[in-house]
Image: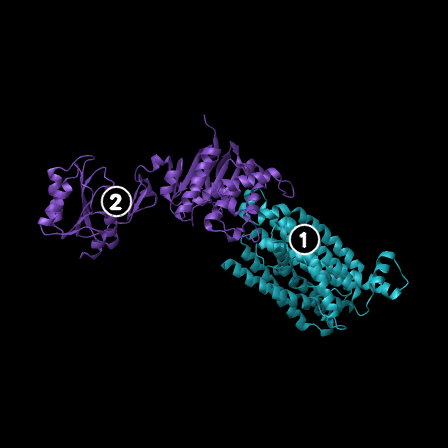
Amino acid sequence: MSRIRSCIVFPLFLVLLLAAVILSIHIGSVSISAKDIVDILFKGDRSNSVAYNIIWKIRLPRIVLASLLGGALSLSGFLIQTFFRNPIAGPFVLGISSGAKLFLAITTIIMTGLFNQMPVSVTVIASFVGSLLSLLLVLLFTGKVRSMSILLVIGIMISYICSAITDLLINFANDSDIVNLTHWSMGSFSAATWQDVYISAFIVLPTLLIVFFASKPMGAYLMGEGYAKSLGVNIRAFRVLLVLMTGILSSCVAAFAGPISFVGIAVPHISRLLLKTSKPILMIPASFLCGALFCVLCDLGARTLFSPTELSISTVTSAIGAPIVIWLLISRRRRNED
Amino acid sequence: MKTDKLRLDSLTVGYNRVPLISDITLSLAKGEIMTLIGPNGAGKSTILKSITRHLASIAGTVYLDDKNMRLISGTDVAKKLAVVLTERIRPEMMTCFEFVSAGRYPYTGSFGMLTAHDKEVVKGALEKVNALDIADKDISQISDGQRQRILLARAICQEPEVIVLDEPTSFLDIRHKIELLGILSDMAKKSGISVVMSLHEIDLAQRVSDRIVCVKGDKIAAYGTPEEIFSDDTIKRLYDIESGSFNALLGNIELASPSGEIRCFVVGGGGCGIPYYRALQKRGIPFAAGILPGNDIDLAVAAPLAKYVVKTPPFMTASPGDIAEAKKLIDSVDIVIDCGCPAGELNCFNSQLLNYASDKGKTIVKSLAELEEAEL
């Protein structure tokens, strides 16, 4: 049964992703014809230098980055849902994005104070370091706390503390200094470069591979810790691995695109509904692909819906993702009542 | 000598290094069922969790096949020992087949792919618990009884030599309790799998187990065969039963007998009196019963419930003294209940008593419906 579904769902995701990529290359302030796309991408035709530059320097890196980070975000959502055994959890509940924002705020204020500028590379590094710091904090608790719900509350509390400090800093900062911060917290794939793509790929792809190799214990973990342990899974190590992988993936997203909301919650669940299984070995690639597809489409929406004004990516993902989450909650309850 | 599958050697268990029960020494042979009984909170689960290594034991050793379990790897333990836990399972989008197949974990490769043999074992396990028909159902949509069987199938398909079950029958109705214990008993006898479990139903424990462990206080209160454990007041002491009674031999439970002066006399015997004794107990009416031979089934219920029981030795008819005693009791009440016990050679005294009662102008109640309306 699930085998037949996989045979339909995976090719479907791939075809749709390819279509979304081509559509994203085609649509924009300058529309590029299908013929030009093929010529430029596959024949290396440089005769139309404007189109060539738009594709290779602007649209393609942006699309690739969106699919990489979208996949990463969705996968980290799947991991955190596995970890909490709660399908409504999202990767940023652990306080990762607020940690990133706090660290970014501090760095921005120091950088503008000292050098009067805030280079993009520093933004990326600062938010990544901030995410990892809050992740480290969560990991310290993961080892000690036995109850999942307490850990969830700790994550939320860390978020609040970080937000409080961030707000305090913003109160005393010049508006011009924190433009960067506001821009970051809206989330966007704009201004993506190939360098961003390479670095993200360097982080995301190996993590994806590690996660994939951990799919067997993950399947056992789904039954509950007691059963997983009785089957020989080292629970403590496995929990740390899960949180670490989630953290690295979502930190990478936070660093390069900001805190994108709802993808991590909604997309794994959509994949689960489509595949009608929880098997990690299927769910890991499926969430990644579905996340990539979802983000490429949302980014296309963000770019084009109100062009020339570009929306933040979270605006689009929230507008689509929030109703999905509400629908999931209601249909879940209905299913449980049956 | 028979080798022990599982042996606990002066084990001390507890939480956070605080000993709860100490000096537990037990052993279990192949194909035997050992049941832990005892009051709530006595530490049955704590002992089971320490055996399955979900809880670190404080002192002592658990031996699995004569090997110290502390020195065996998790996967090797998983191939010999499987568990059915009380923890709630709520996986989403998982069929019963998928759930059960997770028991193959210690045998599958690094991606957990099932071979044809694995699938056969899973099917066999489902068959053993009569759950083949629900194999493709979602695990969140089956009943409690079915879930418990699926949990057991998961343990079975781990192909263990020992299965540890923590209160496998709670939340099940009586039919499913009997069914589950039947499966366990079969499994132990036919497949030689040893079973350790905790049960709340002492009457069922008595019937299914080869060994009974009574857990109470900081020690094992008693340990032995059901015959040994259920022969005396052990159960009453184990559960501190002060009101009510538990008949160890029959597994019969009665509530406390009503107090006060007796208000009626029940002429019963041969099981006919049992519904009357219980009806009177329910309404809180103290009563006397008789005359019952020592081997009468009525006695098992009358003895704990009635204020007085006039008894004769087993297989004997009543002596004049017994009859006089019964008549004296009848004199002191207004109502006499005739349970309609068939009359035979040995219990001719019953009709004698009933005649005496009607001569004395006592109200004779002849059915439960009449008893309902009688002024008592």
Residue displayed at 51% across by 58% down: A336
- Tell me if residue A41 comes above or below residue B275 in the rendering: below
Callout 2: residue from which chain? B
Which residue sits furthest left? B359
* Location of residue B79 by image quarter: top right
Q: A165 above or below B149?
A: below
**Of A81 and B278, the residue lying toward us:** B278
Task: Check disc 2 and report the residue beneath it.
Answer: B301
Left or right: residue B120 compared with residue B208: right
> Which label belongs to residue B57?
none
Colour of chain A in the rendered structure image: cyan
> Where is residue A138 drawn, in percent x and y?
61, 56
Residue topped by disc 1 = A8
> Is the image coloured rainbow, by chain, by secondary structure, or in one colour?
by chain
| Amino acid marked by disc 2 | Val
Residue A39 at x, y percent in the picture: 86, 59
Q: Which chain shows up in purple?
A: B
- Circle 1 packing at 10 Å, graded few (<14), some (14-19), many (20+), is few
Residue in front for this viewpoint, B74 or B96: B96
- The answer to whether any part of residue A95 appears in the image is no
Disc 1 residue type (three-letter): Ile
User: In the image shown, does B63 or A47 lie closer to the viewer?
Assistant: A47
Q: Mark 1–mark 2 contact, CB under 8 Å?
A: no
Could you tell me residue B261's position as x and y percent? 17, 52
Disc 1 and disc 2 on one polypeptide chain? no
Gap in angstroms between the C-alphas marked 1 and 2: 67 Å
Q: Residue furthest bottom?
A: A175
- Left or right, A40 with reference to A78: right
